[in-house]
Image: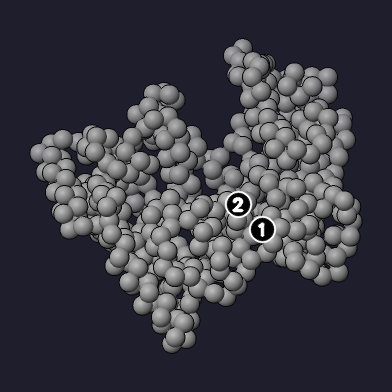
Amino acid sequence: MSSSAPFTRCVVARPTPLLLVLAFLAAASLAPAAPARAQQPADTQKPADTQKPADTQQAAGGGAVVDEIVAVVDDDVVLRSEVERQFQALLRQQRQQQGRLPPREQLWNKVLQRRIDNQVMIVHARRDTTITAPDSRVQQVLARRIDRLAQRAGGRDALEQEYGKTISQLKADFEEPVRDRLLWQRLRQERLNEVSVTPSEVREWFADVPRDSLPTVPMTVQLSHIVRYPEASESAQQQAREVASSVRDSVLAGVPIEEMARRYSDDSATASQGGQMERQLSELVPSFAAVVSRAPIGEITQVFQTRFGYHVARVNERSGNTVDLNHVLIEVDKSNASGEKAKRYLSAVRDSITNQNAPFGLMASRHSEEQRSARQGGRVTDPESEESTLRMSKLNASWKSTLRDLEEGQISQPREVQLLSGERAFHLVKLTERTPRHQMNLEQDYARIKQLALQRKKQRIYRKWVQELREEVYVDVRVQPGDLSASAR
């Protein structure tokens, strides 16, 4: 969320069109932080001052900050440390954009007001009985958060040591703020989903942007591809199967699967956590999901194969579409894998498209082994942003060499590639569109400009709506401009 409301004691400047343009190109949103709870009377009388805790926290900017309550929203509190973290993140973002920085106190106040606005929204989302956050979705988000924390900590055991709590206790601690965040997102989404902009509004918005402030749009491409992975030799396959079988034998003999995962698993995302992960079945590749969806709880599966290699797994729990499991992955050595079979296959596919007029999208959905793009008729999207317009500067050399000589509408010969996921493969590429580097304009960038104009309109509507909602919620700002931390001065 990027809206800001007037600060009680310091006016926060509204974003200019130029800042929105820059935000579109390189900004990240600040999600609502987990609220702390305060004891508050049922009426809207000002609660008694809260004692500042004696302990200190390290501010993101480097100085020690005595944590304190800087605002109270309904029965939740906003802590100085929360504002500090988001302030430092926004400061880094502004510096990366190399734009003119607003006064630091103004920026700090903007973050504070954003936190208050978020919390006001959470309060209203809790009150709205028509909005729910399904338990399955809450558990999915919780699982991902725990996985990320465990990965940073060096495994689940290290995470439990760091927090002094079990994984179950951590999940219980995170569950309410995660549910609050999902409710907040749903409430905001329902209010803003129907907002649209007309072509005249798009032109009016763009006309307000100073011509000399328009950014340069880098060269971009839109493309589709059909992917085949190189096949490892039979000896490499057999070796991986044998290692996986030995792992399974050791687990059946009494060695914990967690220990075997730490020692031998090639899944870097879960090995340090003893191979543990919690996922929606729909997030898993079909060959993996097919096994763990029906494996008996607590039993060790037979060795099974996916395109990642050979697996041994133990399902710990299944709840609806969510599965908690431990697994060991043994990858097949493909360092010497020949791509000849993949290239011959792709050549036959290309012949069907170019000589027999088979639609590229249909052939991609039938023959591409990269599931992500195959589901979209071969369309390549950025793994993080989901955007189909890709900056040439962000593509690696294997992509650039293939695209260099292609004209729009042409299909490449089979070429080796390092996919956006980092995997080695072979593919056919169809270049749909190439847009040279240029200054942003309506003719070439209407879709982008429309998105910016819509974003600006949504922000305007959202700010007005939040201000109306703030009238219905107890809000007490407990910080004066002179009380701001040293990092905000």
Contact, CB < 8 Å: mark 1 with mark 2?
Answer: yes
Residue 293 sits above or below residue 473 on the image: below
* Image coords of residue 333 (percent x, y): 25, 49
Residue 219's disc is 1
Residue 175 sits above or below residue 104 on the image: below
Residue 281 sits above or below residue 170 on the image: below
Q: Which residue is drawn at 27% across and 56% down?
A: 337
* Image coords of residue 311 (percent x, y): 24, 50
* Image coords of residue 44 (percent x, y): 77, 34
Q: Residue at x 56, y 62 (%)?
A: 404
Q: In this view, does 116 lie to the left or right of 18?
A: left
Residue 393's disc is 2
> What is the quadrant of the C terminus in the image?
top right
Q: Is residue 362 left or right of residue 94?
A: left
Identify which amino acid the numbered label 2 is placed on: Ser
Q: Which colour scheme is used?
A: one colour
Q: Which of marks 1 and 2 is nearer the N terminus?
A: 1
Find the distance from the CA under tag 1 to the CA under tag 2.
Answer: 8 Å
Farthest front residue in view: 405
Q: Is residue 265 left or right of residue 391?
A: left
Residue 180 sits above or below residue 457 on the image: above
Residue 152's disc is none
* Image coords of residue 19 (percent x, y): 79, 46
Quarter of the figure with residue 60: top right
Q: Which residue is drawn at 27% across and 41% down?
A: 265
Residue 219 visible within the image: yes
Nearer-the-camera pick, 123 or 487: 487
For mark 2, give the secondary structure.
helix
